[in-house]
Image: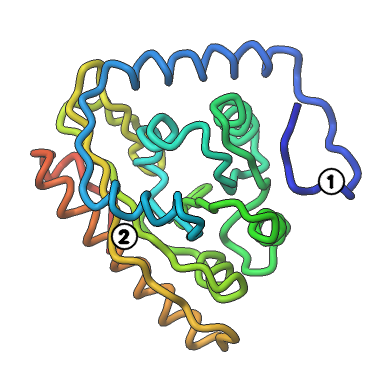
Amino acid sequence: MSRSAAEGRAPPAPPPWWVGPATAIGAGLVRLLGTSWRIGRVGVREYDARLARGERCIFAFWHARLLPLVYTHRGRGIAVLVSRSRDGELIAGVIERLGFVTARGSSSRAGGEGILDMLEWAGKGHLLALTPDGPRGPAGQVKPGLAYLASRTGLPVVPVATAAKRAWVLSSWDRFRVPGPFARVWVAYGEPLRVPAGLDDAAARAWGARLEGAIHDLTLELARRAGESDRDRAGESG
C-alpha cells in the first residue's frame, strides 16, 4: 500500500501487476547487499543522537549516491521525495518496504506537488530527505525545491554523502553508484545549514548555490577518503 501524504487527492491509477513483486525483490536485494557492507561513518552518530532526542532536519544528497542511505536509514519513517516516473514508482515501492514514506513529485519546482507533500510530512513530525539534483538532472546541481522547503519548514539542511571505492557505476544520467558486495562504504553528514524564511528569488538562488557547494564539498572529501578515482566522480559538479 502506498504511504503518500496526498491522502485527500484522487488516487493514482494502480501500478502494473509486476511492480509489487519487483519492489519486494528490490528491497530484499538492498537488505542482502547492505548486510555485506563494512560501513564507516563520519559525523553521523553525533547528529543522529540529536535526532533521537527529537530534533528534525532535511537530509540532502546527490541522486547517484542514494543507495547506501536506503540501507543505513531504513526503518526510521523518513519522508523521501520520489518522482512520478515509472522508475520512481519502483523506487517508491522499494523504499516504502524498507520503512520510508514517500512524497511523489519533483524538486525542480518550489511550489510543486511533491514539495507540498513534503511540507505535509514535515507537519506530521517526519524527517525529510531529497536528492536536489533529481529526478533527471543535471547531476550535481541543486534545484529550487530544496531551499524553498527549508525556508518554509524552518528545518536545517544536513548535507549527506556516501562513497565506496568498489562500486558499479551505471551509464545513467547521474552515473548511479552501486557499492559491490563486502565493499567498504562511507556515510558522512556535513554541518547543518539553516535557510532563512521568506526568501525572494535572488536569495533563494544564492542559498541554492550555497547548499550545492556544501553537498559537493562533502561528497568530494568523502570520495577521496574512500579512494574513489576522479573518473568515478565525473559529472558531479559543484
Q: Compared with residue 91, is residue 60 higher up or lower down, i.e. above or below?
A: below
Q: Which mark is residue 73?
A: none
Q: Identify which amino acid the numbered label 1 is placed on.
A: Glu
Residue 64 location (% of width, % of height)? 37, 41
Q: Nearer the viewer, residue 217 or 168?
A: 217
Quadrant that contains the N terminus: top right
Q: Identify which amino acid the numbered label 2 is placed on.
A: Ile
Q: Residues within 10 Å of mark 2 (few under 14, many from 20)?
A: many
Q: Nearer the viewer, residue 118 or 57?
A: 57
Residue 134 location (% of width, % of height)? 49, 50
Q: Residue at x 48, y 32 (%)?
A: 74
Q: Which mark is residue 215?
A: 2
Residue position for label 1: 7
On screen, residue 171 versus residue 80, left or right, reads: left
On screen, residue 237 versus residue 126, left or right, reads: left
Q: Secondary structure at mark 1?
A: loop
